[in-house]
Image: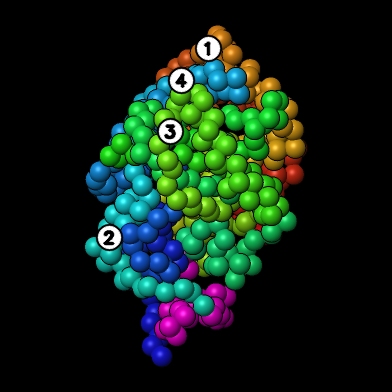
Amino acid sequence: MSHRRFDALVVGAGPAGSVAATVLARGGARVALVDKARFPRAKACGDLVGPRGVQLLDDLGLRVGGSVPVGDMIVVGPTGRRVRLPCFPGDTYPDRAFALPRAELDASLYDAAVTAGAEPFLGRVDTPLVGARGLEGFALASGEELRADTVIGADGATSRVAAVAGLVEPDCVLWGFAVRAYVDAPVQVPHIVFWEPAPWHAFPGYGWLFPGPDGRANVGLGIGTLSDRGAAAAATRRLPAFVDTLRDLELLDRSATGPVLGGWLKLGMVGTRPAHARVLLTGDAAGLVNPLQGEGIAQAMGSGRAAAHAVLDAPDRPADRYRAHLAGVYAPYAKTAATIHATLLHHPRTVSAAGRLLTAPFVGSTLAGGWSLYWNDLLEGASERSARTVAAAATRVGRSMTGRSRTRRWIDGALDSSR
C-alpha cells in the first residue's frame, strides 16, 4: 500500500475540481486530482456556459475548442408566447455564452489541470483518513492512500467529501434532478420553457432546448424536489411529453432523441456548509447552482478558482478566506433565489400565473433586459443602464420579501466564520 502526501487533494475532476487543480498547480502547490471516471465522460447537463464562465476561462487563459457561441435566450411561456432575453456585455463579463457537451468541456479542463502539474488519480475515494485536524485525505478503492493539508470536495451534489466531513444537513437541502438527451436538430438560440403538463399546473422546475455543435441540440428537464429525493423520477417520466410539447411548438422536428442521462443538483447553497477547517466544497458539492434557472458550470469554475486562491493565499485558515468569498459573491443572490424557489414549488398555479404574466404582450418585452440580468445573476458588473435599473429594483423587492426567511438565516449561519 502506497502513502502519498500533497498540499491539496481535489476530489472530483469536473469544472470545479479541474479549475481548482489548475490554479493550485500553477501557484506551485503539489496537487492530487482524483476522479472515479476516465475522461472524456458524459454528464447530465444543459451544456451551456454563461458569460461569467466565459470570462473566467479567458482570465485563466484556458481555451476550449469546438464550442457554439450563444447570445440571447428565448423564454417560452405556458401559452406558447415567447420573450427574447438579451445578452448584454457587462463591465466584468462579455455579451456571450457558449454551448459544448460536458464530455468535451470537462475533458479539456481536466487536461489543462494535468498539464499545469496536477497529479491525476483514477479511482473512487473509499476510506476517509482522519488526523488531528480532521479529514486529511482518503484511501482509494485500490488501497492507495492520499493525504493533504487541504481537501477540496468537487465531487458533485451527492459529495462523499461533504458527507464524511459532516457538512450536510439532508433535511435542509434544496434538491433538484435533471435529465437530458441529445437530438439531431439544428437549434440557433437557447430556449427555456415554462411548461405545464396540465393547464394551470406548472411543472415544478424548468425545461430547456439548447444548441450544440454539429447540428445537435440538448433537450432536458430539471425538477425541484425540496428535500424529497424520491420525486426525481417525475423528470425522467415526463421528458417524452415535454419533447412532444416542443414539437407542438415547432421548436423541434420529429427526430428521435438519444439516450437519457440524469443527475442530481443541489440548489442555492442551502443545507450544506461550504467549508470547515481544511475542507472546502465547490460547485454542486456546495450547492452552487442557480435555483431559478439551473446554471451551475460558471459557479463551479468560479468557486474552484476561489478555493484554490484560499489555499494558496491563506494556507493556515483557508476555510475563513473561502467562506468570505462565497458570502460576497454568491450568497446575496442565493439567499433570495433559494427562498423564491422553495416557496413556489408549493404553489404550481402561482408559477403558472407568473409564467403567463412575464410572457404577456408588452410586459415581457418591457422587462426583458432586467429579467435577463436578474434571472442569470448578472446584476453585479452590469453596464446596460435601463436593464440594470429593472434588475436592481427586482433585487430590492426580492430581498425585502425574503428578509426574514429561514433559508436566508440558514445561509448566513453556514457562512459565519465564528461557528
Left/right of residue 19 with respect to residue 352 in the rendered view: left
207 to the left or right of 396: left
Kind of residue at badge 4: Arg
Expressed as whole percent of the image width and height from the top left, the position of residue 99 reads 35, 39
Q: Residue 84's mark?
A: 4
Q: Does dot 1 land on a helix, a strand or a loop?
A: helix
Q: Mark 3, mark 1: which one is toward the viewer?
A: 3
Q: How many numbered marks appear?
A: 4
- Spatial CA distance of label 3 from label 1 is 34 Å
Where, by quadrant of the figure, is residue 31 drawn? bottom left
SS at badge 3: loop
Residue 69 or residue 127, whichever sits in front: 69
Q: Which residue is outermost to the top?
A: 362
The main secondary structure of the magenta stretch is: strand
Q: Which residues are magenta?
A: 127-152
For disc 3, the marked residue is: 254
What residue is shown with label 2?
111
The answer to if 128 sits in the magenta stretch is yes
Earlier in the chain: of badge 2 and badge 1, it is 2
Above or below 234: residue 80: above
User: In which quadrant of the rendered image does the C terminus lie?
Assistant: bottom right
- Residue 315: quarter of image: bottom left
- Amino acid under disc 2: Asp
Decide if residue 277 is in sight here: no
| Residue type at the position of mark 3 | Arg
**Residue 366 tag number:** 1
Q: Secondary structure at mark 4?
A: strand
Q: Position of residue 33 (x, y in %)?
A: 37, 68
Mark 2–mark 4 distance (CA, rounded to whole Å): 36 Å
53 w.r.t. 419: above or below: above
**Mark 4 vs mark 3, CA separation in Å:** 25 Å
